[in-house]
Structures are given as C-alpha cells and as structure tokens.
Amino acid sequence: MGPDAARYLLAGAGHQVARPFNLRWLLPAVCGDDVSLWRLVWLLSWPLAAAGAFCWAFGVTSSWQVAAAATVLLLALPGIWGPKAIRPVGVDLPAMALGLLAAGAYVNNQPFICVVLVLWAACIKETTPAWVALWVWHPLPLIGLGAVAVAALIKRPALDSVTARSDLREIHDHPLLSALQFREGRWRDAWLWVAPWGATAAALVPISTQTAVTIGLAHLQLLVATDQVRLVQYAAGPIMALAAAKNLPLQWLPLVVVLHVFWWRQPETV
C-alpha cells in the first residue's frame, strides 16, 4: 500500500491528514478504513467511467463507433489503471468516473445533473471540476470548486503520521524541488513522456485548442508532484482519447483499439 492510500485510510479512521488529502473527504467518510469497501468503490468506478465516457463522447460526436473507441482508448491507458500503490484505495478513478458522468450530463443538456455530479466529484478529488470544465469546454463545472472551498474551511490540514516520515515530509515541505529531483535525467525519456499515451497520441494530429490547453494544464501539475503518468492521464486522458478517436479514420478504429489495449512493454503507471 502506498503513502496516499495510507493517508486515505487514516482519514477514514477519523484522523486529520495533510493537504491536499484533507480536501478529499468523501470516500474516507463513506468507506472508512475498510479496504473491502474501497475495493467495491474501485470496481464500480470502471463501469461508471465507461458509461460516462461513452455518453460524453456520443454527445459530442453523435457517432457510437467513435464514442465506443474513445471509451476503450481512455480506460486502457496505463495511468487510468494506475500503480498498485493506489489500487484499490485511491481517489483518481472514482473522481474521474463521476467527472465523466457530469460531462455526459452537460453535453446531453442536463446542466443541473452535471453540477450535482461535479460537486460530488470535487469532494473525492479537489481538481476534478477544473478538468471537467476543460472536457466540456465550458465554465459551468467550476461551480464544483465551491465544495472544495467549503472543505478547505472545515477540514483543516494536519501533519499526519504518514506525511511525517522523513522522505514524505521533504516532498510535502518542498514540492517544487522534489518534483524536479524525481525527474532528473528523464526529461527526454520517451518511455515516460510519450509511450504511456499509446494510440491516444493521434490526438496531436491535428491538435485542437481544447486538446492543447488541457494537456498543457495537465502537465503543469508536474511542477509540484512526483507522480506523473496517472496524474496527467486522469486530467487529459478523456480529451486525448476522444480527440484521437475523432482524428483516426473510422475503418481503422478497431485495429487501433486492439493495438492500444495490449501493452507492448511494461508501461509507466506512476
């Protein structure tokens, strides 16, 4: 179990935790420190994410073939599967699932449902409203940041027993320096920066303004984070998957999806 998971279990047991984990209160409140409940949430998040991705992509393209391909391209990304350290005790997949359902509601003319879902998602992971706003290219989902502001006032951060470890305390106190040190010597490593995107790299030719802005902002997280693939793919994976499915010739989509789903070498997931 990784340090992030340990902090979620601490929060679930009623302890205060360090930022930004203090803002992610909903799943610890529901699941507590029961790993079996976390596993159930993680398993249920897959069909919910698939449903949300398909509804959103179909609402954008009106093509079930493109929507189906985009859904598979997204869920097959190694960062969505994530490292073992966050399975099943993690917040990325459940938050993305609700975010995708919110995006699907928005493009299908259900703004109220979109706002409700994005508020829930914000209580699972605080950055979700910003990513949903980019996925639908509209500011409405940013209303979800109100839930983050309330949590910031109520759920005060504290130096928990996990963060107090010397290595994690260094990351907590000096996030920018730690991020740079973790990537030293890997700034042009294609296995880290390019290969994990697989067939979704087709989103770059041609690249839309929405795709460019989303992937750019997703990578800005890396200035203060040591993890990489799971963070950028949680944020930009939906846009990359949809744009790639739209850019590729329809008749090639089945082959591309098959080649994308099966990893040709062990990918980076952290």
Image (cartoon, rainbow, N blue to C red):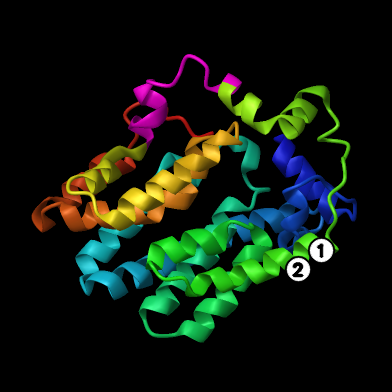
Name the amino acid, label 2: Val
Q: Is residue 194 inside the magenta stretch?
A: yes
Q: Which mark is residue 270?
A: none
Where does the image place residue 257, in percent across and percent down from the top left? 25, 48
Q: Position of residue 37 (x, y in %)?
A: 72, 58
Is residue 23 left or right of 79 when viewed as pictured? right
Where 90 falls versus 124 (above or below)?
Answer: above
Residue 175's quadrant in the figure? top right
Q: Nearer the viewer, residue 222 or 14?
A: 222
Q: Is residue 15 left or right of residue 9?
A: right
Which residue bears the numbered disc 2?
150
Q: Disc 2 versus disc 1: distance between alpha carbons?
A: 5 Å
Please state which of residues 28 and 257 is positioned toward the viewer in this rendering: 28
In the displayed structure, 241 sits above or below 107; it is above
Point out residue 170 in the picture as x, y percentages from the top left corner.
Answer: 76, 26
Secondary structure of the residue carrying tag 1 is helix
Asked if marks 2 and 1 touch (Cβ < 8 Å), the reply is: yes
Q: Would you say residue 232 sits in the magenta stretch?
A: no
Q: Which corner quadrant holds the N terminus? A: top right
94 to the left or right of 215: right
Number of residues whose C-alpha sits closer than 10 Å to that of mark 1, classed few (under 14), some (14–19) or many (20 or more): few
Residue appearing at x 43%, y 21% in the figure: 187
In this orientation, does residue 219 appear? Answer: yes
Residues rendered magenta in the picture: 181-196
Q: Residue at x 77, y 60 (%)?
A: 152
Q: Amino acid at mark 1?
A: Leu
* Residue at x-position 17% and y-position 49%: 206
Label 1 belongs to which residue? 153
Residue 123's image quarter?
Answer: bottom right
Q: Name the spot of residue 69 as percent of width and height, x first.
A: 26, 57
| Relative side of 193 to 19, left or right | left
